[in-house]
Image (tube, coloured by chain):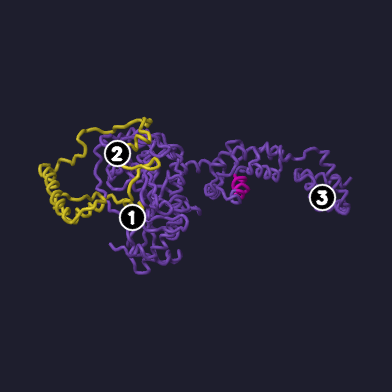
Chain colours: A purple, B yellow
Amino acid sequence: MTTASTHSEPELVEFDDVVARFDPVLGIEVHVELSTNTKMFCGCPTEFGAEPNTQVCPVCLGMPGALPVVNRAAVESAMRIGLALNCEIAPWGRFARKNYFYPDMPKNFQTSQYDEPIAHDGFLDLTLDDGEVVRIGIERAHMEEDTGKSLHVGGADGRIHGADHSLLDYNRAGVPLIEIVTKMIPDTGARAPEVARAYVTALRDLIKSLGVSDVRMDQGSMRADVNLSLSPSGSGQLGTRTETKNVNSLRSVERAVRHEMSRQAGVLDAGGEIVQETRHFDEATGHTRAGRRKETSEDYRYFPEPDLVPIAPSAEWVEELRGTLPELPWERRKRIQTEWGISDEEIRDLVNAGALDLVEATVAAGASSQEARSWWVAYLAQQANTRSVELADLAITPEQVARVIALVADGELTNKLARQVVDGVLDGEGSPDEVVAARGLKVVSDEGELIAAVDAALAEQPDVVEKIRGGKVAAAGAIVGAVMKATRGQADAKRVKELVVERSSL
Amino acid sequence: MTAHSAERTDSGGVITRDEVAHLARLARLAVTEDELDTFAGQLDVIIGSVARVGEVAADDIPPTSHAVPLENVFRPDERRPGLDQAQALAGAPAAEDGRFRVPRILGEEQ
């Protein structure tokens, strides 16, 4: 193998040009850290963010004579993930040692599964933004353990390049990990970046619904590696793939695929060869850079783990676990769609806006689905956008939104006032009722007060009064506006209009 | 995608210097030219001896990975006391900031 093509920076090819001339082939590996109480092979806790090396024991530190024992809950979680992905569960399988020499595992090997994964041959259906359904084949889901965390000291920005030495924290070493590997995903063309993102999103939602992991990409409890190769359009020849590691957000998944397509096309256009290697995604630039030359499978010297006995799930155990699967995301969408009587497109919009959970919770708190949807996808989505936060991170709870909706329904607030109440809640002024009280936002329902305001406005614009008397009811708008202004928008505009007509004809 | 075709090194053959050099590189061991010859010869003897076991195994005897016929040995997902930081680091040649300190061993990131 030559190293030349990894080090020279190729010209990036425009994305449209890439897809006009090449067929991308995707493959995605996702690692999910299980949220079990303890590690895969020992009773150490798995909490995120603990002091370094305080969640360790002789087993996960790889000390001589320590004997690992498999965590039953982790095996059940693995099987549930496999079942939810429509996989076959292997009736018999072993763990294997994946041998490599890097200090992130103190044992000098990682306990994994090799050619006997616990789950294999499944699929996951994705719905893209425009409603197209893509079926992603799942090759396997296997159990392994996470590695420790390395801190590189002395180099620039914590990278090993130029570092003087490294510091290891083994709290994470041995945390149960499920690796889910897709089959090759061909024929996605220009939609490859979108499909990659949609797959990781769907997988995240699925695993979240199973309650087996918190799937926080920002905390590393879910990590995606993106494999990509290009083949000249229609050639049917498989290109050499690269693997972009640890892509840590949904957006980055999309960007990494897009960039790697442009980069590989550039290398191929320049007559170069794609080198099978690991690449790293740089969040700041959106580019990938060359990492370690990939060891071959043979280099890992996999062999069956002698310290762990085989796992042989009985058919009864598998069926029992199948029975524990909760309502899965697509089943839930179908149910909600029926309950709320909304179209495919409407439910998709809710899902894409990240609003489904929020709307459902708002409905659960007593709001009508129509009102709840309208608030979340319109005004609140707009506020989230203005404030540059995710919808779910807005400082308002579904219960509070439901309360605002109830206040409007009871005639206590107009829609306009309701928006001011929501603004107040978002600005941290308290609950909807507190904001109403503090800002004095109640609808002016005192008829006497309203009449006085209407009469005052009429007195100021006698010409308008003449027009109304002459039958031009539309002219009442000017008076209504003046009254709304005088009451700081806190009057019911419909009632004001009635009063204007009534009072002007006296 | 993880390659998982069941290709393994056939250990029946002769261990070459190149193979020893490759293994040494994977293991990040500095091995001299002389040592390559020494280890190739020694490893060859070891592997040859172990390979003789295969000569007595009939075709109907599957490879054995576990000496004891046990399956499904699990532990409940319950915490057990482990080591504290000082205990964990007690045997480490070097430590810093509560972490194991190791020399930089690779010129690239994993």
Q: What is the CA distance from the residue labelled 1 to the residue labelled 3?
A: 77 Å
**What's the mark number on residue A479?**
3
- Same chain assignment for discs 1 and 3: no
- Image quadrant for the C terminus of chain A? top right
**Which residue does the numbered mark 1 point to in the structure image?**
B107
Front position in the image: A338 or A480: A480
Front position in the image: A243 or A408: A243
Badge 3, how many Cα within 10 Å: few under 14, some, many 20+?
many
- Please identify the quarter of the rendering in which residue B83 is found: top left
**Which residue does the numbered mark 2 point to in the structure image?**
A62
Mark 3–mark 2 CB contact (< 8 Å): no
Q: Which residues, given as a range, are shown in magenta?
A: A373-383
Badge 2 amino acid: Gly
Name the mark nearer the viewer: 3 or 2.
2
| Residue A72 percent location from the top left of the image | 34, 33
The residue sitting at the bottom extreme is A270
Q: Does the magenta stretch include residue A376?
A: yes
